[in-house]
Amino acid sequence: MYVLGIDTSNYTTSLALIDENKNIISKKKLLPVKEGALGLRQSDAVFHHTARLYSLYEELVADIDCSLIGAVGVSVRPRPIEGSYMPCFLVGVNAARIIASTLKIPLYEYSHQEGHIAAAILSSGADRLFDERFLAFHVSGGTTEAVIAEPDGFGFKLEKVACTLDLNAGQAVDRVGVMLGLGFPCGKELEKLALDYKGEVKVRPTLKGCDCCLSGLENQCRGMYENNSSKEKIAYYCIKYIEETLGAMTDRLLEKHGQLPLLYAGGVMSNVIIKESFTAKYSALFAEPEFSSDNAAGTAYLALREYRYDKQIRA
């Protein structure tokens, strides 16, 4: 039996199938962004998702007996709170509803954030977290938040405990990267530049309580650029600033909420500099790189767990 996951986020069309042994088959494709641009309008994201979703689905199920698909999970909104909404998710929602209705199978709905956290749990092999209280960071182009996760039957419920008060970490990475002439999204290219820098930098994170401010990072990197600092140094400074900021947030949250297990999810957290630092300092859990960026694997995994949970309840 397979469970299908669908996620149509602002920058990636993603589909995944998971079987009962948690084996994953996935297909995903970044949405096209014009050179020098810093993102997409929602209307463009909706268009591109609509144009490519069928071809990706066709690839995904090419060697699969679709009668073995027992449930569908889909991302319906950015975060699991009232009023959280982005039009791009409607493309995936409509496709999921059509597939579930046609195959007469259950449909389960989640937020994009829940999918990211579940994908990190899946790829790190930390299923025990479904039975524990833990602290999770979701750090991407659209979100920079820390949440407390509490067990809730098949999955978890989330409570936001910290966030950015201005710029998201992924936005900072992309703005600095585009300034340096890198392709959008800029994370991987910026990481390569940073790894080539062998010097030291001094950064001073800006926090208000457990929340952070990242808009100053862009201004400081621009000042370095205008003063002819090397691209490698600017890239390293950008990443170290984000690392120090997230580390300071983590320390304050652990002091406030106790020594909880730590999990980091989202595209920014695939950065090897940050990952190696936090693994050593906190023994933290991370998603594998292919599960860090936007993907449907976590959504599929949550749907598999909820499907099993429903069967147990009915039994």
Image (cartoon, rainbow, N blue to C red):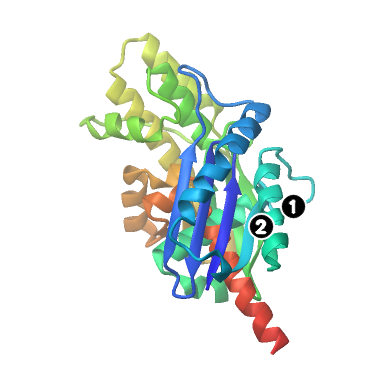
Give the residue drawn at x 31%, y 57%. 280
x, y percent for residue 269: 43, 47
Q: Quadrant of the C terminus?
A: bottom right
Q: CA distance from mark 2 to mark 1?
A: 26 Å
x, y percent for residue 86: 70, 39
Q: Quadrant of residue 103?
A: bottom right
x, y percent for residue 225: 37, 14
Counting residues from the start of the chain, the first of labels 2 and 1 encountered is 1
Mark 2 element type: helix
- Dot 1 amino acid type: Ile
Residue 40 showing in the rendered view: yes
Residue position marked by numbered label 1 in the rendering? 81
- Dot 2 amino acid type: Ile
Residue position marked by numbered label 2 in the rendering? 99
Mark 1 element type: loop
- The 10 Å Cα crowd at callout 1, few under 14, some 14 to 19, many 20 or more, is few
x, y percent for residue 208: 61, 40
Residue 249 showing in the rendered view: no
Q: Nearer the viewer, residue 186 or 25?
A: 25
